[in-house]
Image (cartoon, rainbow, N blue to C red):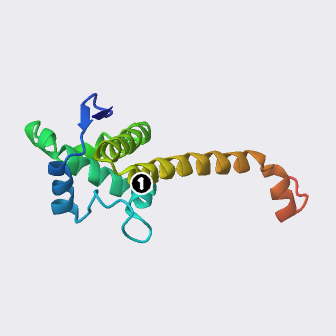
Amino acid sequence: MKTFTDSAGRNWPLCLTIDSAKRVRDLLNINLLEPEAGDPPLITRLGTDEILLCDVLFAMVKPQADSQNITSEQFGQALGGDVILAAHTAFYGEIIDFFQKRGRTDRAKAAATQQKMIDIAIARVTQKMDEIDVSQKLTEIFGEQSIS
């Protein structure tokens, strides 16, 4: 079981079980047990669509949220960028662990590969952005103009 802590200091355990997968399916019409389904695949959508990921997370922890009278809106309000990153990491870890233990190493590998692809893409885009000389690009676009 993986966990993450929201910005309100609440600890949320993520546990992918048949019960939590059924809850996600019933509430969101998303089958976590078929991460390769769809175009793009569900595992890709979950890695790139923060709102979808947060909806899935809430469905997974809904019994705990209900016991604390925390609504989906309140849950979302406590998910800033740093929390989403921690939740994203916990979610992928939980998916990988579930499929490893289930003997579906293909699905575990797909989730691990998707996580790695996201990490590499972020690093490459960041590197490319760091290489841009903004001042030079503006000069190329507008020419040499003095700013008064």
Q: Is residue 45 left or right of residue 2?
A: right
Residue drawn at point x = 86 percent, y = 61 percent: 140
Indicate whether 41 appears above or below 136: below
Residue drawn at point x = 10 percent, y = 43 percent: 66
- Across and down, in percent, residue 20 comes to 18, 49
Of residues 95 and 51, which is closer to you in this image? 95
Q: Is residue 13 left or right of residue 63?
A: right
- Across and down, in percent, residue 127 comes to 71, 45
Q: Secondary structure at mark 1?
A: helix
Residue with the most extreme bottom position? 39
Residue corresponding to mark 1:
106
- Across and down, in percent, residue 110 comes to 45, 54
Q: Tell me if I can see residue 11 in this picture.
A: yes
Label 1 sits on what residue type?
Asp
Residue with the most extreme front position? 103
Of residues 17 and 29, which is closer to you in this image? 17
Q: Is residue 80 left or right of residue 125?
A: left
